[in-house]
Image (cartoon, rainbow, N blue to C red):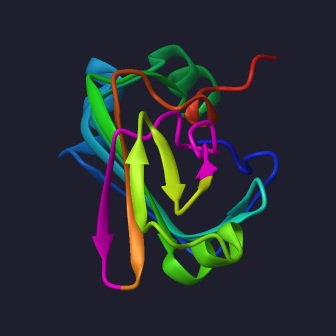
Amino acid sequence: MHDAIPGVAGGTTTASIDSFPFLGRLVVNGRVERVSVHQEDVKARGIRFTAIDVDLRGVHVDRGALVRHRRVELTGIDRGTVTATVGLGELLRLAGSAVTGGVRLDDGVLVIGDVRLDLAGSPLLPCVTSLRFEGAAVALTCRLHDPPIELMPVPS
């Protein structure tokens, strides 16, 4: 993953790789079964996300970059999901006083009362396919078939 994603400020980040032995699988197969990343307090595009979680399955990496440069460069995934959580207080701030009709998802766009917030394209969130309430927050999820562009290697 990049050292920093342009236009994004965030808090604590944790990551895990489910594959044993992980280095052996990378060198031999150029693949690991699962990579999960969790970042808290992400600020991007004027929105403060409580957290963004990325769960990738069947992660493919460039074996040449690993062996020659000791860098793990993502080249593809079998599937994955990104979930961005936004607190209701943040949604109210974004919508102002327009909150009269509740919170819903309309063709991938978050709708709060009369205000439409198109969050697709936010860092790590290329689409929004589902919405669920989690206490005082809304979790927006995108199902992936390609890795988010922010996780791909930067062309040199």
Residue drawn at the location 57% of the way across and 36% of the way down: 151
Q: Residue at x 57, y 21 (%)?
A: 65
Chief SS of the magenta region: loop
Give residue 7's position: percent from left, percent from top. 82, 50
Left or right of 49: which side holds 25? left
Magenta span covers which residues? 116-135
> Is residue 92 inside the magenta stretch?
no
Q: What residue is drawn where x is 50% and y is 79%? A: 88
Find residue 17 and report its horizontal and vertical position in percent.
Answer: 31, 51
Taking the image as shown, residue 12 lies to the left or right of residue 93, namely left
Q: Position of residue 68 (x, y in %)?
A: 60, 21
Q: Is residue 131 magenta?
A: yes
Q: Is residue 109 above or below residue 31?
A: below
Residue 101, horizontal then vertical, whole percent? 45, 66
Pick the residue in front: 40 or 83: 83
For residue 102, side relative to residue 22 (left or right): right
* Image: 80 above or below 153: below
Q: Which of the pair 14/100 is nearer the observer?
A: 100
Q: Where 40 falls versus 28 (above or below)?
A: below
Image quadrant assignment for residue 15: bottom left
As drawn, 15 above or below 74: below
- The answer to which quarter of the image holds residue 19 is top left
